[in-house]
């Protein structure tokens, strides 16, 4: 159980449940009880990206693949070797650069 205080607002997390209390003044306290499912739904409605554990794992793996593709695409020795040995080397790297840019843009949406 975690208790946190923000001026005039206290909240307590107990397992999957969240209790929010706000002092309204004059000795009156407003209390809201939420389950983690409710909080997740509200966050989604507010535009806050909410990812499941499996989605976070996929995102981490996608980031690793993107980093490796970027490293390959940006290594000059790889580029020059592929271009020298492959007739469509320029086209391949143009496609790879585009894929890397799309992947980077995709990942930025989650930061």
Image: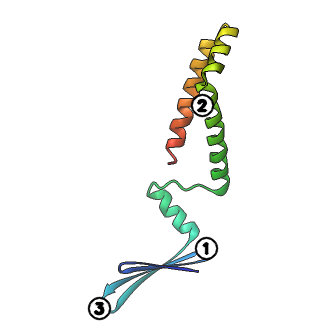
Q: Position of residue 95 (x, y in %)?
A: 59, 21
Report the residue marked by disc 3: 26
- Is there any visible trace of residue 86 in the rendered image? no
SS class of the residue under badge 2?
helix
- Whichever of callouts 3 and 2 sits on the residue coming sooner in the sequence is 3
Report the residue marked by disc 2: 70
Q: Position of residue 91 (x, y in %)?
A: 60, 14
Position of 67 relative to 34 (above/below): above
What residue sits 66% from the left and 20% below the top?
78
Left or right relative to 64: residue 32: left
In 3D space, how far apart are the residues under numbered discs 3 and 1 (Cα atoms)?
A: 31 Å
Report the residue marked by disc 1: 16
In 3D space, how far apart are the residues under numbered discs 3 and 2 (Cα atoms)?
A: 60 Å
**Residue farthest along the front direction in this orientation:** 77
**Residue farthest along the left direction in this orientation:** 26
What residue sits 59% from the left and 55% below the top?
51
What residue sits 54% from the left and 32% below the top?
102
């Amino acid at each position: 159980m975690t208790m946190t205080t923000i001026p005039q607002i206290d909240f307590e997390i107990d397992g999957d449940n969240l209790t929010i209390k706000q002092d309204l003044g004059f000795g009156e306290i407003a209390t809201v009880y939420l389950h983690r499912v409710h909080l997740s739904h509200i966050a989604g409605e507010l535009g806050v990206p909410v990812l499941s554990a499996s989605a976070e794992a996929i995102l981490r793996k996608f980031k690793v693949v993107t980093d490796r593709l970027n490293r390959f695409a940006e290594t000059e020795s790889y580029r020059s070797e592929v271009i020298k040995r492959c007739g469509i080397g320029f086209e391949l790297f143009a496609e790879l650069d585009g894929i890397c840019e799309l992947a980077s843009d995709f990942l930025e949406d989650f930061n």
